[in-house]
Structures are given as C-alpha cells and as structure tokens.
Image: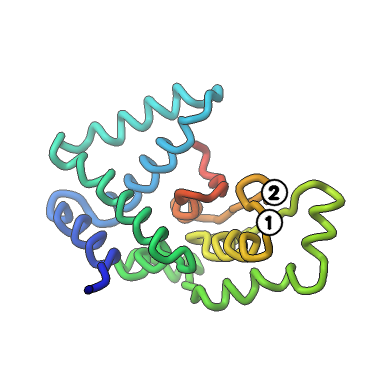
Amino acid sequence: MKKRDYQKEFCSLINRHASRYSRWQIWNDFLYLTAAALANVFPVPEREEREKQYLSVIGRYTTEEQKVFPEMMALVTLALEDNPEQDFLGSLYHDLNLQQEQKGQFFTPYDISRFMAEIPFAGNNAKEELDRKGYISVNDPACGAGAMLIAFANAAKKYGINYQKQVLFVAQDIDHVKPGTGFQPGTTVEPDMGI
C-alpha cells in the first residue's frame, strides 16, 4: 500500500488558491485560524476578541475557499498521527519557500531536535525536577515551527512522562507567525502570538 504524501497534499491545497491569495497569506491565515480555534476552547477574557479576529480573517474567503482550512488541519493531524517524530509544519514552511533568511530563520533538522531533546533525560535530571516541582519545563526562545518542543514531548512520552500534564512548554520567536506553527494537535505548546 502506497504511503500518503501529506506534505504534497497540503501544498496542493495552498497552491489551489495561490492565484487569488499569496501562499504566505494562506499560510499565515491557516496558522491564525487554527491557533485561535484551538485556543477558543477555553473560556478566557480574550476569547471574544479572538473570535472577532477569527471571523474577520475567515471572512476574506468565499464559502468554498473556507473549506481548505479544515482540510489543511486534517492533513496536519493525519501526518502527525502517522509519524509524531517529525517537524511537519517546519518542513512545509520551507517546502513552500516561506522562510526568511534575513530574519535568521533556518531549518533545524528534526534529528538534531530529537538529539537535543534527549539531553535532559540523560541521568536523572528530568525525573528529579519532576519529583521536586511536579512538572518539568522546556523553553525554546527561537522556536520556529516548534521542532525542539515537539521532540521534547516525544522524549518525555518515551520516558513515561505525561507531556500534556507534566511538562510546561514555552515557545517564543521574533516572528509572530512561526510560534503559531508549534501549536499542533496533541501538544500543550502555547504560542506567544498575542492570541
């Protein structure tokens, strides 16, 4: 059975509408709409303002064009379910040629992120912190698409730590769009993008 190429399918969805909108605009809107929809599950004071912004962004698209965003999210979910050990959105970001080297945005291969995520689990450092504080934390001040945080979540799971309940993820970046890519299903990464 042939394996699905989720990246190719995702790029195809963006390219389908690239004649009317730039790929950058579709990507940016996808990230905002996805992050806002996931964040609006929680009843916080920012919810109403976020919902207004969500409706403003989605309102730029026709009813038919709006259907592409849940399709894109479905592809992200399927890709990560099929292989959680990857930086799916980071790879897409570069495949779509959206990176901006002048901002210092460079792709870190997932294997490097995985190696770095294993370091705190060498010895008993992570386990000792968990025992002492009840949680462990990871901070990525240049998170990009969140590969390091995703790798850390996978490493925590490997070592029997419930990353959804026992890990505090902090994701920061100079580009407000990039931390949004780390806000993926099954993670507790909260992007610092003012939403």
The residue nearer to you, when weighing 134 against 142, is 134
Specify the quadrant of the image occupied by residue 62.
Answer: top left
Using the image, tell me which numbered label, if any, was put on residue 86.
none
Residue at the image position 33 percent from the left and 47 percent from the top: 30
Q: Position of residue 160 (x, y in %)?
A: 67, 59
Specify the quadrant of the image occupied by residue 190.
Answer: top right
In the picture, measured across the screen, residue 96 lies left or right of residue 100, that is left
Q: Are marks 2 and 1 in contact (CB under 8 Å)?
A: yes
How dense is the environment of label 1, judged by Cα within 10 Å: few (below 14), some, or many (20 and up)?
A: some
Q: Is residue 31 above or below residue 49?
A: below
Specify the quadrant of the image occupied by residue 141.
Answer: bottom right
What SS does tag 2 mark?
helix
Q: Which residue is mark 1?
A: 161
Q: Which residue is mark 2?
A: 166
Q: Nearer the viewer, mark 2 or mark 1?
A: 1
The residue nearer to you, when weighing 49 against 3, is 3
Q: Is residue 102 above or below residue 71?
A: below
What SS does tag 1 mark?
loop
Q: Residue furthest front?
A: 1
Q: Position of residue 179 (x, y in %)?
A: 50, 53
Question: The disc labelled 1 sits on which kind of residue?
Answer: Ile
Sequence order check, earlier mark of 2 and 1: 1
